[in-house]
Image: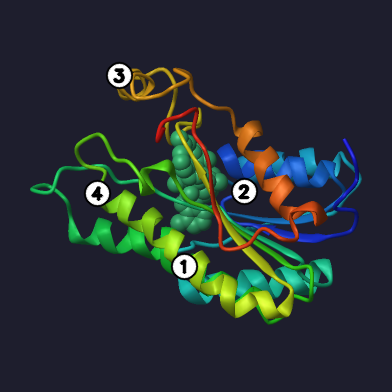
Amino acid sequence: MNHQLENKRVLVTGGSRGIGAAIVKRLAQEGAHVALTYVSKPDQANATAKAAQAFGVKAITIKADSADANAVVSVVERTVDELGGIDILVNNAGIAVIAPIDAYRLEDLDRTLAVNLRAVFVATQAAVKHMKTGGRIITIGSCNAERVPFEGGAVYAMSKAALVGLVKGLAHDLGPRGITINNVQPGPINTDLNPEDSDFADMLRKQMAMPRYGTTDEVAAMVAYLAGAEAGFVTGASLTIDGGFTA
Ligand SMILES: NC(=O)c1ccc[n+]([C@@H]2O[C@H](COP(=O)([O-])OP(=O)(O)OC[C@H]3O[C@@H](n4cnc5c(N)ncnc54)[C@H](OP(=O)(O)O)[C@@H]3O)[C@@H](O)[C@H]2O)c1
């Protein structure tokens, strides 16, 4: 593993488990100091921070609900205070409430948009105040922005589709400042959110060119590419990693 991110300062929202935890560990392995947020599982957050520290970098955990805009701004400020700045922001925290339209609760729509979309804008706005040329913003969207072949996924898909437009627009705000912003769109990935051993998973695999779930490490590798110097000309892009779910 090369050390392309030596001494970069990174914030990963929702970094305690799943895809976020894999991103934390991968960027730490490449030499970055990392702050990660969590909301409900401090033990998982601490375990992930410890795994990152094993690579010889600083790693801190911050409890913060992404649905709370003030908390999101505070997380960015604390990252800057404790790591000495911020070079890379990974907006990973996300929730999925799947329910058909007749049963969908308005409070779940509001919370989904607050966590999956508004928090991305708020964290990005707070982070770019501190970022210099070479800064990187990476959001974790979803293949469901492009294809939603099951009942009940509309609100989740809407929240992820909005990220496609957000990164395109912000690419123009941030490009002249030398900061890139991109969106990674995973397909089915084996995590607590979407375990590979369920009836839902069996249905999804049938939709894919490669009928298997992806791993969190595969997504983290794409994030590491976008975070590094070699991706300096990639911005405003939504890059899909989905085993052909949308093919
Ligand atoms: N898994 C998939 O198949 C898949 C596919 C496409 C896109 N994605 C996207 O990838 C991202 C990560 O998903 P995942 O599968 O890794 O999910 P996960 O296993 O459920 O993990 C979610 C992570 O986000 C944190 N989190 C949840 N709600 C939060 C909130 N309100 N504020 C702050 N942190 C919060 C959790 O913290 P705690 O540990 O404290 O609960 C945890 O660290 C999400 O944006 C998701 O939409 C996932």
- Mark 1 — residue? 166
Residue pushed farthest left?
102
Q: CA distance from mark 3 to mark 2?
A: 27 Å
From the top left corner, tell me how far across and down residue 29 is, in percent: 83, 41
- Mark 4 — residue? 154
Q: Residue at x 55, y 62 (%)?
A: 64
For the image, the number of numbered tags is 4
- Mark 3 — residue? 199
Q: Residue at x 30, y 46 (%)?
A: 97
Does 199 sit left or right of 50 as displayed? left
Which badge, 1 or 2, is on the more N-terminal residue?
Answer: 2
Asked whether 40 or 11 is in front, the reply is: 11
Q: CA distance from mark 1 to mark 2?
A: 22 Å
User: Mark 4 is on which residue type?
Assistant: Ala
Q: Is mark 2 within 8 Å of ligand 1?
A: yes
User: Mark 2 is on which residue type?
Assistant: Gly
Please identify the quarter of the rendering in which residue 232 is found: bottom right
- Mark 2 — residue? 15
